[in-house]
Amino acid sequence: MALSAKTNYHLKRILPIGLIWLFIGWAFLWSEYAVLGDGANTPESAIRITPRIIVFASISVFAVGCLVGFIEVRLINKLFAKKSFPQKLVGKFLLYAILMFCIMLVFFILAAAIELQESIFSKNVLDRYVLFFFSITHISTAVQLLFSLIVSLLYAEISENIGQHVLLNFFTGHYHKPRVEHRMFMFVDMKDSTSIAEKIGHKTYFKLLKDYYQSFSEAIIRNYGEVYQYVGDEIVITWKLQRGLQNNNALQCFFEMKAALQKRQHRFKKEYGLLPDFKAALHIGQVTTGEIGALKKDIFFTGDVLNTTARILSLSTELQQDFLISECLANQLKVPENLCLTDLGIQSLKGKTLPIRIFAINIKEPLT
């Protein structure tokens, strides 16, 4: 059974945190073994390192890391969405520190029960925990957990700010050497943004932009889109070609973004006195993708497809259409029955020598 796009997206955010905890756990475990040796010097308060304990500790630490990742991605992050980075870090750290204390209690008792081969409720196991609680081993374990927590929180914040796909690509070195790819790009531009900014003021307009972009998040995730960049009131979304064509993900993304704004229309009208709208253009082509930048690294796409998509978007007002696509994309699409593909003829693009045929896509009007 294939995972949904949303589940796949969240797993890619949660699993790296689990791996961070696992690798840090191994590092601490190895350093402890290097100091204590084969167990002759192991303090009575510490769990002796055996193969069974190593397996248990690895599974437990990875599970705890994934739990922290799940709580971070699905619950806690929403509570701190409007807080500054220092406020997020301190607030989350305090909440997770309490959670870590509870986890340490549970897993130490389980590990002690495994080592002593007794019930977790036995007096020997509980005495072992009391000894552990007032020992240097407790402090050492707390330092390990809190260090893992700080690293994973920093990773989560960096990932959220520069983008999950960008961060993973940097870590894996996927684009360290430039790669040629066939991609699909959708340029999305807010309608009448200049007049809206003048009407509500730039500070309020900035807040509107944040809510406007936030409205699109679920639609982009559900349809496997990757946000390439935000440029003022414009957002550029990209797909690898086959992923964008699969199940009409790119087309669905546009209409789900429209639906998301409509669903929030009462909030926008109450907060800002208006409902923003947008137009978009979709095109495909070959790009060279790689890391670029001296003072700031980024994953960069270069190719004629980006310039052409921007030029197609500029025709939307003249052609009075919200969603335009190129002929080369239209030829590869299997347009679903609920959508109507309209040929708008061959159009000249500003700055381009050769004109191209443009199509509009709209939802079919119901029969009356």
Image (cartoon, rainbow, N blue to C red):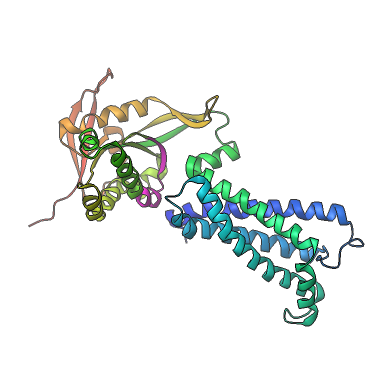
Give the percent coordinates (x, y) of residue 108. 73, 69
Horizontal placement of 93 versus 122: left or right?
A: left
Decide which of 255, 1 is in the foreground and name it: 255
Q: Quadrant of residue 239?
A: top left
Quarter of the image that includes the C terminus = bottom left
Q: Is residue 123 magenta?
A: no
Residue at (47% x, 30% y) in the render: 300
Q: Quadrant of residue 121?
A: bottom right
Q: Residue furthest left?
A: 368
Q: Is residue 284 visible?
A: yes
Decide which of 365, 220 is in the foreground and name it: 220
Magenta residue span: 217-230
Up-down relation of residue 192 to residue 68 (above or below): above
Decide which of 3, 100 is in the foreground and name it: 100
Residue at (58% x, 55% y) in the render: 93
Q: Is residue 240 visible?
A: no
Q: Residue furthest right?
A: 40
Give the percent coordinates (x, y) of residue 40. 92, 62
Decide which of 305, 34 is in the foreground and name it: 34
Horizontal placement of 160 versus 37: left or right?
A: left
Up-down relation of residue 229 to residue 12 (above or below): above
Up-down relation of residue 90 to residue 321 (above or below): below
Residue at (48% x, 42% y) in the render: 161
Give the percent coordinates (x, y) of residue 245. 36, 44
Horizontal placement of 35 versus 238: left or right?
A: right
Image mark count: 0
Q: Is residue 227 magenta?
A: yes
Give the percent coordinates (x, y) of residue 136. 80, 61
